[in-house]
Amino acid sequence: MSQKEKLLLFVLACLNFTHIMDFMILMPLGPQLMRYFGISPQQFSLLVSAYSFSAGVSGFCVAFIADRFPRKYLILVAYTGFVVGTLACALAPTFGWLMVARTVAGLFGGVLGAQVMAAVGDTFAYERRASAMGVVMTAFSVASVVGVPTGLYLASVWSWHAPFWFVGGLGLLVIGLIYGFVPRLDGHLQGRAKTTHQPFEVLTNILKSPNQLRALWLTTTIMLGHFSIIPFISPYLVANVGFSEKNIFLIYAVGGALTLFTAPQVGKLADKRGKYPVFVVFALLSMIPMWLITNLQINSLPIILSAAGLFFVFSNGRLIPTQAMTSSVVLPQQRGGFLAINTSLQLLMQSVAVYWAGLIIERQPDGKLLHYNWVGYGAMAFIFISIFIARHVKPVDAQPISQPQNVEE
């Protein structure tokens, strides 16, 4: 791997780190935000889902035009808008303005994930692409281990505004890195004038393929089960269990650290034993911490961290074979458009999951949350259903196409 390629991966990993941290940090800030603004669980769920919903809409729209521009320009515009939205969150004086700022951040942030993956795909040949993807995707674990705990520490010392100032400040530095070190990445534009662009081809291909539709249904059920629980973990532990807000960062630090070690092993296991069998095992195992977390009553640091650690490990283990299965249901020539739609659906279903969880959960006058266990049972049902859907998601019988492109000067 050349120095230019390593530098590109470093910049994309920095971009991913700030993007993921911005999305993740709002959920553990739930207790502070609900207290500071005097909002209900339903209003907090709207705040969380505003980002995912707007990101899903923008990601869907951009999927039809993304391949008409150099990757660098689209990444630079989207990331700049994302940083502006994040700094607006830091400045938001009211709940309403914070909602607007989160929506703006989501509109631009929803474009970034698919474009980062497209940039890696354009630069690295198929035989080297998995290693490159792994470097960029370590940003999730680093954001969990370092980013979220740092953000929560800043929030505890100053206020909930501080994490957004932190991410926004880092984002300004990353904008400079993108401008200076990311090449144009316009190889996909070569020869475009010789072909007729069909903007809705990706949708017609999906509608004609039951296999692709089943893959999207799998994404839907996984997200409805996964994200209905996550946003209310911190508010529930603080309000109902008595867990200290100052210790919330430990949940993400422990969970992220564990996935740094388990995720590569799960990937190897899925390749060796089969994606679907490994998915079934981790889907069933993930129901254990889902039940533990949503029914927890004991304020014990070892028990809480153990339950949270299991949740991170088993949920991550469930998602790895899911992504492998959904990415294999299309030919390589159609993969970019399909994955853009799939990513958009993920974000939209995250929004729906958070919103319906907020409708079920009620806040008592003493601040405690009711019916979180109901949300847990519903989430477990969705994960159980996903097992039967995944069984019928089949890889297409085609060899991937190598694209040996190097980083341009």
Image (cartoon, helix red, strand yellow):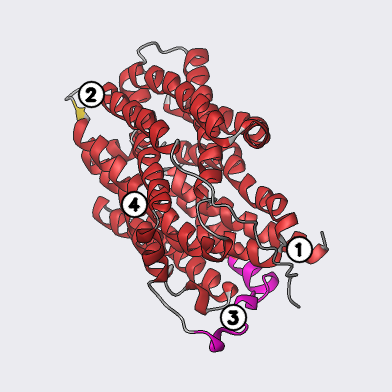
Q: Which mark is residue 85?
A: none
Q: Does the magenta-highlighted stretch encompass residue 82?
A: no
> Residue 305's spot in the image, x, y percent?
51, 20
Q: Nearer the viewer, residue 133 or 73?
A: 133
Q: Which residues are magenta?
A: 175-195
Disc 4 or 1, which lies upstream in sequence?
1
How much space separates mark 2 and mark 3, taking CA atoms? 52 Å
Residue highlighted by disc 1: 5
At label 3, the amino acid type is Leu
The location of residue 199, given as percent across then percent down, is 40, 75
Report the residue marked by disc 2: 371
Q: CA distance from mark 2 to mark 1?
A: 50 Å
Q: Name which of mark 4 and mark 2 comes first in the sequence.
A: 4
Quarter of the view holding residue 92 = bottom left
| Comparing labels 2 and 3, the label whose residue is closer to the camera | 3
> In the structure shown, which secondary structural element does the residue marked by tag 1 occupy?
helix
Up-down relation of residue 120 to residue 159 (above or below): below
